Image (cartoon, helix red, strand yellow):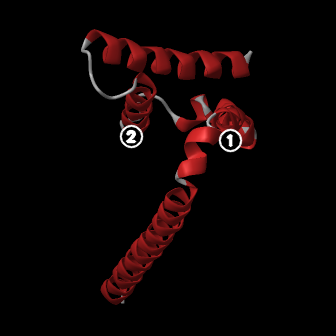
Amino acid sequence: MKLFREAIIILGIYLLGEFISEVLSLPVPGNILGMIILLFLLCTKIIKLEQINTISNFLLDHLAFFFIPAGVGLMTSVDIIKDSWLKLIVVCIATTIIIISSTGLIVQYITRKNNKRGENLEHINK
């Protein structure tokens, strides 16, 4: 029953995002709006993580399953991809390098900032 209740919460937020996107004719897809709404609800503690933890872990554990439709879509578009495969590979490699680099730099920055904050707290406590 807990899994069903958590799934209803996630589905309700998704449907709310779809409804808002459709009614306001926004260029943002409803599923993205649903994720933003869920983030807001989690940050404001209106929904607690424990209320959706089980279904979230289930969905994350089976994430690869959700990529099957995209893979099939790529297979049906081979004729289009065939003409620009080199460009696609270059873009994929470039964006991967950018994402990995920026993530590493952000993690280093936050780690240094947290270490300095910890050192400052140690000096204050002495």
**Front residue of this view, candidates 109 and 85:** 85
Q: Position of residue 34 (x, y in %)?
A: 43, 26
- Decide if residue 61 is on the left or right side of residue 105: right
**Pointer 1 or 2: first along the chain:** 2
Q: Residue at x 35, y 78 (%)?
A: 113
- The residue carrying pointer 2 sits among few (fewer than 14), some (14 to 19) or many (20 or more) residues within 10 Å by Cα, namely few
Q: Residue at x 37, y 28 (%)?
A: 33
- Decide if residue 10 is on the left or right side of residue 78: left
46, above or below 63, in the image: above
The reply to whether callout 1 and callout 2 are in contact (CB within 8 Å) is no
Q: Amino acid at mark 1?
A: Leu
Instruction: Name the secondary structure under disc 2.
Output: helix
Q: In terms of image quadrants, where is residue 51?
A: top right
Q: Residue at x 60, y 30 (%)?
A: 52
Q: Identify the residue under disc 2.
A: 43
Residue 60: mark? 1
- Decide if residue 95 is on the left or right side of residue 120: right
Q: Position of residue 124 (x, y in %)?
A: 30, 84
113, above or below 62, in the image: below
Q: In terms of image quadrants, where is residue 17?
A: top left
Q: Amino acid at mark 2?
A: Cys
**Front residue of this view, candidates 12 and 44:** 12
